[in-house]
Image: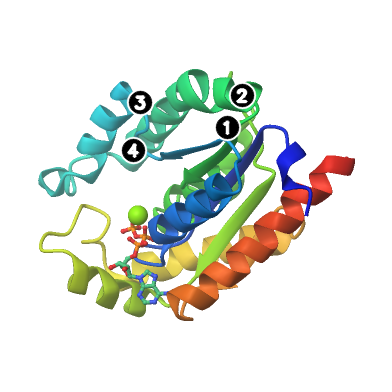
Amino acid sequence: MTLKKVPGRFITFEGIEGCGKSTQTRLLADYLSSRGLKVLVTREPGGTRLGEAIRKLLLDPANAGRIDPRVELLLYLASRQQLLAEVIIPARAAGKIVLCDRYEDATLAYQGAGRGLGMEKIRRLLKFLPLRVQPDLTLLFDLDPAEGFRRIRKAKKTLDRFEREKLDFHRKVRAGYLRIARAEKKRVKVINAALPVKEVYRQVVKIASQTLSSNLTR
Ligand SMILES: Nc1ncnc2c1ncn2[C@@H]1O[C@H](COP(=O)(O)OP(=O)(O)OP(=O)(O)O)[C@@H](O)[C@H]1O
Ligand SMILES: [Mg+2]
C-alpha cells in the first residue's frame, strides 16, 4: 500500500457512549504513526483550551436539566468552530491525517435526533457556519446502548451528563446515526461495535486504508 504519499486527511469516529470510539481512535493513530504518517488526534467537544472549557460545562452532571437544548447545540458548534480554526484546518494544511473522536454527525444524532431538535433543521443551520470541513471518512461504531452502558459502568466510577440520560435517549441517538449512514453511504461506514476490540480494529484499519489509498488518485 502506498500510504506514505497520503496528503492531509480527515477521519471522524462516531457512535453512542461506550461504543469504542476512543479505543479505536488511539489504535488507528498508533497504526498510522508506526507507518511513518503524520497523525493528529483530537476530540469533541474540546481539543482546544476554549473547547475543553465548553466540554466541562456540557458534560458536568451538575448541569443536568439546566442547559436548554438549543443552547447545548450552540455550545457544541462554538467548540467545533474553535477546533476547526485552531487545530483541524491547520493540521490538514500541514499534510497530517486528522483523527477526530466525534464531529458533526454527533450534533445531528444527539441534538437533532436525541434531543428532538430535528436533524434536517440542524443540517440547514450547519450550512451557515463560517468554518466547515467535510470528513473524508466517518467510522460509525454501531452498538446497542444497553451494551454501551454496561461497558461504561464497568470502566468508570462517575457518569457524565450524557451518560446519565435514559436508554430511550440513546436509542434515538443510535437511530439518528444510522439514518445518516443510510443517507451518506460513501462517507459513513458502519462497523459492528459489539465485536471484540481486535476484530473492530481489523475492520477500522481495512476501511481507513482503503480511503487513504483511494484518495491518492482523486
Ligand atoms: N469492542 C469492544 N468490546 C468490549 N469492550 C470494549 C470494546 N471497545 C471498547 N471497549 C471498552 O469499553 C469501554 C468504553 O470504550 P471507549 O472509551 O473506547 O468508548 P467511547 O465510545 O470512547 O465512549 P465515550 O462515548 O464514553 O467516550 C472501555 O472500557 C473499553 O476498554
Ligand atoms: Mg471516548
Q: Earlier in the sequence, mark 4 or mark 2?
A: 4
* Residue 77 screen position, x and y as percent: 45, 31
Ligand 2: does it lie within 8 Å of the C-beta at label 3?
no
Q: Amino acid at mark 2?
A: Phe
Q: Earlier in the sequence, mark 3 or mark 2?
A: 3
Q: Earlier in the sequence, mark 4 or mark 3?
A: 3
Q: Characterize the local packing of mark 4: few (<14), some (14-19) or many (20 or more) Cα atoms within 10 angstroms.
A: some
Instruction: Identify the residue at horizontal 10%, vertical 45% (top origin).
Output: 62
- Which residue is label 4 attached to? 72
Mark 3 element type: loop
Residue 91 location, quadrant: top right
**Residue 66 vertical placement versus 148 (above, below):** above
Instruction: Identify the residue at horizontal 28%, vertical 39% (top origin).
Output: 68
Closer to the camera: disc 3 or disc 2? 3
Instruction: Identify the residue at horizontal 44%, vertical 74% (top origin).
Output: 197
Closer to the camera: disc 4 or disc 3? 3
Rounded to the nearest angstrom, the CA distance separating label 4 from label 3 is 18 Å
Would you say 57 lies left or right of 49 here? left
* Marks 1 and 2 close (CB-CB < 8 Å): yes
